[in-house]
Image (cartoon, helix red, strand yellow):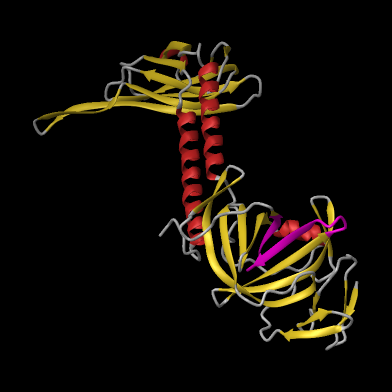
């Protein structure tokens, strides 16, 4: 179908065949009635928006080829405009693309009739409840392409119920009602369907634009993850308890500043801290033990040094003391494997009274610390998602008279 505009001479073409009654020129915005020849109906005075997707452009949606045969520009609330494209397939199936402020919705007409008014804040379609988002009137400001019906000259009532990313949209013109079911159509889908056209940027939040995350799905996933972590830890550590892997009392006469290499020991199970306890009868002196844990499977070493100091006296009529004869420290995250210890005892050179130091190593039972850390991190992430989602929804509903946040 080819029509040359009677006013500007520009030809507009589509491949679809149907009985077109009206033609709107996309270039000079003149509307004609198609009879034996074009008869001018009106020239649209207001020129708010040009087509983004050209009349005659083809795209693949849901595996089927559609052609854009017409486009309306509609206005509501005096300042808001949106584009509404009519898409037709070769088997006469129609889809409708709505674009407003860079947000797209793909709609399809449905046969259902609804009893709607401002008092009905909810609508049920296919057993799903939708919330009233818009109940207003709009006018057609421009019409481009080929139309098989008369262009509405009076106001159209628009009633929209949403449950993002889905929408039920109802148009009422006098006594006639048409209903459409639609969903958010992303810019990526538009580009893929129509060959990467240049699209306008997004402004604000679309009426059915989905949030990046579904809060309830994320919450369910996190809960399941937490349960799995808990069950895994309980299962792996059910038979685990504290295991003493080394204990020896060293004589400084024999081992002062000399390395002692322990026998090998095998650890099996989940990672846990290796606690090293040191005791020496220091008296106004100090002692020290350097402990190195050697992984015989990987040759990795982890070393720590611990001082023992105990001092006491009598000053200004008062007894005082500081330090302790026993100390302990942890080598964290020791996993299963084959290990040995290298221990180097030391004492204060002029201490002739103390000749013993005891070193004990205990592999602790695994703690629930990692589980609680995981719960804390997931809780923080879930909290961030919750408040981000609430802000997102508040922005979505800010332009609606029926916002649940008011």
Q: Quadrant of residue 315?
A: top left
- In magenta, the rendered stretch is 89-109
The residue at the point 76 percent across, 69 percent down is: 198
The residue at the point 48 percent across, 55 percent down is: 120
Residue 288 picture location, percent across and down? 41, 24
Give the position of the N terminus as an image quadrant.
bottom right
Q: Nearer the viewer, residue 128 or 287?
A: 128
Q: Is residue 360 magenta?
A: no
Task: Report whether 360 appears left or right of 183.
Answer: left
The residue at the point 50 percent across, 34 percent down is: 374
Q: Nearer the viewer, residue 173 or 244?
A: 173
Q: Is residue 371 above or below residue 154?
A: above
Q: Quadrant of residue 334?
A: top right
Magenta: main secondary structure equals: strand
Instruction: Check the image and name the residue furthest to the bottom.
Output: 7
Residue 317 picture location, percent across and down? 8, 31
Q: Quadrant of residue 9?
A: bottom right
Residue 111 picture location, percent across and down? 68, 52
Query: Does any portion of residue 260 appear in the rendered image?
Result: no
């Amino acid at each position: 179908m080819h029509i040359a505009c009677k006013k500007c001479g520009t030809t507009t073409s589509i491949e679809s065949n149907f009985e077109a009654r009206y033609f709107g020129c996309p270039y000079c915005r003149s509307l004609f009635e198609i009879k034996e020849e074009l008869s001018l109906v009106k020239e649209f005075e207001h020129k708010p928006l040009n087509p983004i997707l050209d009349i005659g452009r083809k795209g693949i949606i849901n595996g089927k080829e559609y052609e854009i045969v017409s486009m309306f520009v509609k206005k509501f609330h005096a300042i808001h405009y949106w584009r509404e494209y009519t898409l037709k397939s070769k088997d006469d199936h129609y889809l409708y693309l709505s674009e407003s402020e860079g947000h797209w919705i793909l709609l399809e007409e449905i046969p259902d009739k609804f009893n709607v008014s401002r008092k009905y804040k909810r609508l049920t379609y296919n057993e799903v409840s939708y919330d009233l988002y818009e109940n207003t009137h709009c006018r057609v400001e421009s019409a481009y392409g080929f139309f098989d019906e008369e262009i509405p000259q009076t106001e159209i009532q628009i009633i929209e119920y949403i449950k993002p990313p889905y929408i039920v949209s109802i148009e009422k013109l006098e006594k006639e009602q048409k209903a459409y079911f639609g969903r958010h159509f992303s810019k990526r889908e538009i580009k893929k369907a129509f060959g990467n056209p240049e699209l306008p940027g997004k402004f604000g939040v679309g009426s059915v634009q989905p949030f990046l995350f579904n809060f309830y799905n994320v919450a369910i996933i996190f809960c399941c993850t937490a349960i799995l972590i808990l069950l895994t830890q309980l299962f792996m550590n059910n038979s685990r308890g504290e295991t003493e892997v080394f204990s020896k009392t060293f004589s400084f006469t024999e081992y002062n500043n000399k390395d002692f290499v322990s026998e090998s020991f095998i650890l099996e199970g989940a990672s846990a801290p290796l606690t090293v306890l040191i005791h020496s009868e220091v008296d106004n002196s100090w002692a020290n033990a350097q402990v190195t844990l050697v992984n015989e499977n990987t040759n990795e070493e982890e070393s720590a040094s611990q001082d023992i100091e105990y001092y006491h006296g009598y000053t200004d009529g008062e007894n005082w003391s500081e330090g302790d004869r026993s100390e302990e420290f942890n080598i964290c995250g020791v996993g299963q494997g084959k290990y040995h210890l290298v221990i180097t005892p030391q004492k204060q050179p002029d201490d002739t009274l103390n000749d013993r130091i005891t070193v004990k190593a205990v592999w602790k039972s695994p703690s629930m610390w990692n589980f609680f850390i995981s719960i804390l991190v997931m809780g923080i992430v879930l909290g961030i998602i919750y408040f981000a989602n609430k802000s997102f929804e508040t922005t979505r509903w800010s332009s609606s008279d029926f916002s649940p946040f008011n």
